[in-house]
Amino acid sequence: MASSFLFRRRVSSLGVVSRSLHGNMEHRWLHLESRIEALVTLVGATRKFSSGTGTTKFDFTDLTRPHTWYPNARRKHRKVILHMGPTNSGKTHNALKQLQSSSSGIYCGPLRLLAWEVAKRLNKAKVPCDLITGQEREEVDGAKHKAVTVEMADVTSDYQCAVIDEIQACRWFIWRLTMLGCRTRGFSFTRALLGISADELHLCGDPAAVPLIQEMLRVTGDEVEVQFYERLSPLVPMKVPLGSFSNIQTGDCIVTFSRRNIYRLKSTGFILGLIR
Ligand SMILES: Nc1ncnc2c1ncn2[C@@H]1O[C@H](COP(=O)(O)OP(=O)(O)OP(=O)(O)O)[C@@H](O)[C@H]1O
C-alpha cells in the first residue's frame, strides 16, 4: 500500500507539508530522547538507593516497562495478527478487510496519504470513517472507525479492530536504548503497538520485524499469530539498464529518496507530462 501514493499527482505538494511536520517532530523526539536517557540513568541510581530499605515501593519514574503505561490495552487479552511479507503481497488489503467488517476500528499509517486512502475506502464501502492527521480532522456523522497518522493513534478508546501499517518502523525503548527501525518516528509506532486497546490488532510490515515484535509482546500477555505473504505479482528485472530518463514510458514509476531529488526530477517537464 505504501507505494501507491507515489502515483498521485497531489503527492508532491502534500509530501512537502507532511515532511516539514516530521522535520519539527524529529527535533522534538530527539530532545525528548536525550531527556529520557538522562532520566533513566538517574532512576538507576535511585532504585539502587531505595532497594536497601526493604520496603516495597512503586517507582513512578521507572521507564523500563513501557507496556504498563497503557492500562486499557493491558486489561484486554488482545489477539495480534502479524501480516508479514514483501511489498505488494496483499498484507494491508487483508488487514483492511477485517477493519471494514468490524463494529469499530482504527487504522494507523505512517503517511497522511495512506490514512486518507483508508478513510476514503471505508466511507465508500458505507463504513463511516473519520480522518485524523497532524494537519486535519474530518469527522463523519456516526463514525466508529478512524484512519489516522500513527502519531494521532488513540490509546484511550476501545476498538474491536485496529491496524498498524509499516510496523517495521517500530522502535523499542529499553534500559539502555536499543533501536530498530525509524529513529525519529519509531516511538509513535511503539506507543500504538503497546497502547491501542483493541480485541484484534493487525500489524502489517516487513518480516524482519517479527522477532522484535514478538519480543515486545512477550510481556503484554497478548496472543500472537504470524501470517507470511508472497508477492502477488513477480518482480522481473530488466535485461538491459534503462539508460536515459528519456526512455521512460507512460505507466513507469520513478522512486527517489530525497525531497531535493523529487523536485529535480519534477523540474524535468517530460516526467510530469507522463504522470499526467
Ligand atoms: N485479494 C485481493 N483482491 C483484490 N485486490 C487486492 C487483493 N490483495 C491485494 N490487492 C491489491 O493489491 C495492491 C497491493 O496490496 P496491499 O497494499 O495490500 O499490499 P502490501 O503487501 O500491503 O504492500 P505494502 O508493503 O507496499 O504496503 C492494492 O492495490 C490492493 O488493493
Image (cartoon, helix red, strand yellow):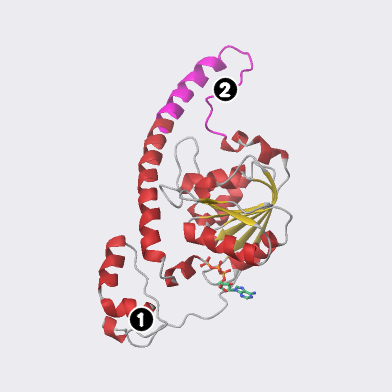
| In the depicted structure, whether residue 160 falls above or below residue 247 | above
Work out which quarter of the rendered image holds the C terminus and state it.
Answer: bottom left
The 10 Å Cα crowd at callout 1, few under 14, some 14 to 19, many 20 or more, is few
Q: In this view, does 8 lie to the left or right of 141?
A: left
- State the residue at coordinates (66%, 35%): 71
Q: Name the residue under label 2.
A: 59
Amino acid bearing label 1: Leu
Segment colored magenta: 37-65
Whole-percent x, y for residue 19 in the image:
37, 54
Q: Is residue 34 left or right of residue 223?
A: left
Which residue in the rendered view is the most extreme toward the top? 53
Is any part of residue 116 visible from this angle?
yes
The residue lying at 68 percent from left, 38 percent from top is 72
Q: Does residue 200 appear anywhere in the picture? A: no
Name the one closer to the observer, 192 or 68: 192
Which of the pair 223/273 is nearer the observer?
Answer: 273
- Identify residue type, mark 2: Asp
